[in-house]
Amino acid sequence: MEAIAKAAEWFIGLFQKGGSVFASLVVGIVPLLIVLMTFVNALITLIGPEKIEGVGKAAAKEGLLYYPVRYVILPFLAVFFLTNPMAYTMGRFLPEKYKPAFYDAAVSYVHPPLGIFPHINPGEIFVWAGIATGVEQAGYNIAELAIRYLLIGLVVILLRGIVTERITAVMWKRKEA
Amino acid sequence: MKALTKFLETVGRGVGKVVGAMYQAGRDTIDQVVTNILPFMAFIAMIIGIILGTGVGDWIANTLSPLASSLVGLIVLSLIIGLPVLSPLLGPGAVIAQIIGTLLGTQFANGSIPAQWALPALFAINPQVGCDFIPVGLALGEAEPETVEVGVPAVLFSRFVTGPISVVLAWLASFGLYS
């Protein structure tokens, strides 16, 4: 009898632990998230997401100068205003040969801004928050981590855009040959 | 008098638009929280609870922590996750990235992994981002079927290269952070 009681206690203990984790997540993350997301969502509606279409047209141009437009500015604006997954519709302004690279850049930027702009991809917040809450519990301020994640993300998507554009070009040639 | 009515009407309309947008934004946000965020938090909390309660956490601390507290370890992690065969399988809903991130988070919390590895770790758990979604993402951009045929392998191969590079970039960028 005592053994059963012990086992039951251990079993419940697992979920008591989980419950306290849940409570700390809801109290620690959700209130800020709700207010911040409401603000940004309202801002986007008032600005009008269709305003970024001009950038989409500019990004289609050839030349070295347009790499950052195509793989940094356009993905950032698309992800910020249209969020995941509608951001990828901005690819329609680009020629076919740039579309895979643009998708690669845009989709790689749905997580790096989550520390500051969680509205971009709230369903996947734990890609950021999993590590960030751990770092916070260790007693560090995570604002600087959030900023660096956001900025390095921009460098990484530029690189991904360029590399994927090259690979696409090579594969296209091989396919036609 | 006519000018005044006109003015009041403009103001009223403007205020109505702003308030309406804010109210709708609140509604959308609560919707997101209830349908996406809270369920995932419940799931994550259950997993962490079981991990901490059963002692699996100690085992993870012993195997995952050494891997996550060195540059080579994180590059190896990103190479595995970025394998062109594996990455589309690991992609959906970013569930794997979120679980690994949360597991690593528990190790950051108790100090098994020093905090200065947080930035490269954020990139190491995520080379597969969107790899499950390439055909759909390209279709949203109105790509031709031919582009999808070339684009899917192009992105997958690119990730295998850019995944580890992103870890190195993040490592370089984390100098002076938490140390």
Image (spheres, coloured by chain):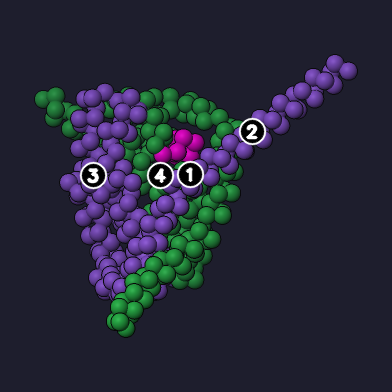
Give SS at disc 3.
helix
Magenta stretch, main secondary structure class: helix
Q: Which chain is purple?
A: B
Vertical placement of B92 versus B102: above or below? Answer: above
Q: Which residue is mark 1?
A: B32
Q: Nearer the viewer, residue B83 or A2?
A: A2
Q: Chain of mark 2?
A: B
CA distance for labels 1 and 3: 25 Å
Type of amino acid under label 3 = Pro
Q: Quadrant of the C terminus of chain A?
A: top left
The stretch of residues the image draws in magenta is: A76-84
Asked if residue A161 shows in the view, the reply is no
Q: Is residue A82 magenta?
A: yes
| Residue B88: image tag | 3
CA distance for labels 1 and 4: 16 Å
Q: Are marks 1 and 2 in contact (CB under 8 Å)?
A: no
Q: Nearer the viewer, mark 1 or mark 3?
A: 1
Q: Quadrant of the N terminus of chain A?
A: bottom left
CA distance for labels 2 and 4: 27 Å
